[in-house]
Image: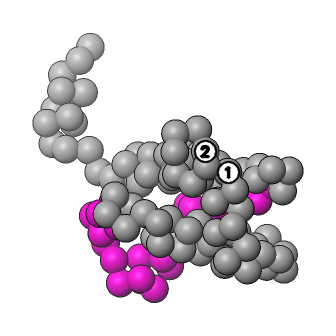
Amino acid sequence: MTNKVTLNFNGKEVEFFFGLSFLGEFLKNEDLDLQGIFSKISTDSYSFIPKLMYASYVHNCERKELPVSLKSFELTDLIESTNYFKDGSESSKFVEPFLQSIIDSLPKSEEAKDNGSKKK
């Protein structure tokens, strides 16, 4: 499971971390649950995705004990300059593995467990 990604915004590389430590902190700070994240991404993407990405970037800096060199609006400008949230854009390269990391961390349904245990 991928829990980080490095994106290239027109020559400026920015690393984001979205593993367990980030997700727990973000959910608590934003008073959201996992369903809330999915909902916000689909209904409020223009404000929520930059906020999510910035929090992930700051968390990565804290984990690595690096200074936070970008301001929130600077990251938003980088997102804007690289095709917003369209397929293939830099921000979509964040959102896709971020959402997949959440899906991968969810418990599998009982049916899926039963089907898996019956296979030989």
Give the residue at x 41% y 76%.
Answer: 27
Dominant secondary structure of the residues highlighted in magenta in the image: helix
Q: Observer-nearest residue: 30 or 28?
A: 30
Marks 2 and 1, Cα distance to the nearest angstrom? 6 Å
Q: State which quarter of the image contains the N terminus.
A: top right
| Amino acid marked by disc 1 | Thr
Q: Is residue 85 above or below residue 20?
A: above
| Amino acid marked by disc 2 | Ser
24 drawn magenta: yes
34 drawn magenta: yes
Horizontal side, residue 76 vs residue 69: left or right: left
Residue 76 place in picture, x, y as percent: 64, 69
Horizontal side, residue 18 vs residue 45: left or right: right
Q: Which residue, given by chain and number where applicable, does mark 2 sit on?
A: 89
Q: Which element is circle 1 on?
A: loop
Q: Quadrant of residue 22?
A: bottom right
Give the residue at x 80% y 50%.
Answer: 10
Q: Is residue 56 above or below residue 85?
A: below
Q: How is the image coloured?
A: one colour
Residue 55 place in picture, x, y as percent: 59, 74
Q: Which element is circle 2 on?
A: loop
Q: How many marks?
A: 2
Q: Observer-nearest residue: 79 or 60?
A: 79
Q: Contact (CB < 8 A) between labels 2 and 1?
A: yes
Horizontal side, residue 49 vs residue 16: left or right: left
Q: State which quarter of the image contains the C terminus.
A: top left
Mark positioned earlier in the residue sequence (2 or 1): 1
Residue 49 place in picture, x, y as percent: 50, 65
Region rendered in magenta: 13-40
Horizontal side, residue 113 vs residue 29: left or right: left
Q: Which residue, given by chain and number where applicable, does mark 1 sit on?
A: 82
